[in-house]
Amino acid sequence: NIVNLSETLPGKLDALAVRLEAQMADNEVLQSYFDTAYESVSTTFENWLKESLIPSMGSIMGNVGSGVLSVVNTLKDVVIGIIVAVYVLASRKLFKRQSEDLLRCIFNAHWSRVIRDEIIYMDKMFSGFLSGKMLDSAIIGLLCYIVCSIAAIPNALLISVIVGLTNIIPFFGPFIGAIPSAVLVLVESPVKALGFLVIILVLQQLDGNVIGPRILGNSTGLSSFWVLFAIILFGGCFGFVGMIIGVPLFAVIYDIIGKLVHWGLQKRGLEGMDELKLEDQQ
């Protein structure tokens, strides 16, 4: 794709220049500035392609080879993980009894129940949010492919996969997926790139207002600020994976802190916000 881009892009830039010159035919000063700027940018870009990018293709392919090997190792780990998961699920009842016995052995009845309830809440939060988000993203990716195919958008399958995968990330996902996808379309056709951005905008509005709420609802119980905070915090700490698991992980932390605050207020005979709101309503 890079080699193809280096071969076709100069011609596409020339065609774009011809169209722009036709629009500026009546303004000689503006056309002169444009010709100078275009020649400089075109020469610099072509020199970069020929002198920097193409000669370094060997090292790039070496890095690609290392990446492929890393993917193979990851797939091996995934297969092993699936096998282990099968054994764990087959012994889930035994593990449950052993875990409950271990909790009762270490903690008293109250704290054993608290820890067990919190683990159940964690399972509900992670499994509900992640599975719902993956289903939501799969629907968005499929809709993107259908609409892009109808609109004859170039590389429809590739950009739909990118949009679907990045849509798993809350809040920032649509922008992360739309930017590289729009660049891929822009190389082929600037007009279709604009149309693609309109399609993405419509799909994200549909996802945010219809599909997402029906599948996920308010599964985390977090406000928009805390969702944004969780994505930035855990994305900065753990990268792409942190952006995916950040919201349910922060929801669990938020729940634990809320319960500790509630317990502390009760111990001191004070009222929290929930109790004050209830009294106001009464």
Image (cartoon, helix red, strand yellow):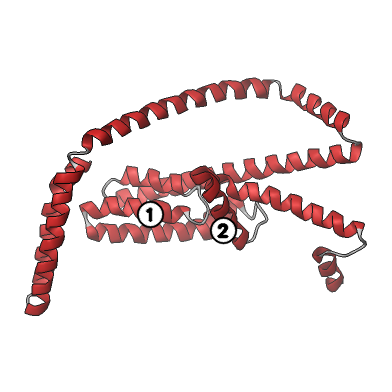
Residue 21 in the figure: left or right of residue 103: left
Q: Can residue 6 be seen in this snapshot?
A: no
Determine which of the numbered discs, if any, sits on residue 245 in the image: none
Q: Which residue is mark 2?
A: 228
Q: Nearer the viewer, mark 1 or mark 2?
A: 2
> Which amino acid type corresponds to the residue marked 2 in the rendered image?
Leu
Residue 131 in the figure: left or right of residue 101: left
Residue under the point 89% across and 64% down? 270
Residue 118 in the figure: left or right of residue 191: right
Looking at this view, is 282 or 247 the one in front?
247
> Which amino acid type corresponds to the residue marked 1 in the rendered image?
Ala
Residue under the point 26% across and 48% down? 154
Residue under the point 75% across and 24% down? 95
Residue 12 in the figure: left or right of residue 267: left
Residue 85 at what x, y percent from top left?
A: 61, 25
Residue 147 at what x, y percent from top left?
A: 35, 52
Q: Quadrant of residue 204?
A: bottom left
Does 47 sit above or below residue 226? Answer: above
Residue under the point 32% across and 33% down? 63
Could you tell which of marks 1 and 2 lies nearer the N-terminus? 1
- Which SS class for mark 1? helix
Looking at this view, is 47 or 226 the one in front?
47
- Which SS class for mark 2? helix
- Determine the CA span between mark 1 and mark 2: 19 Å
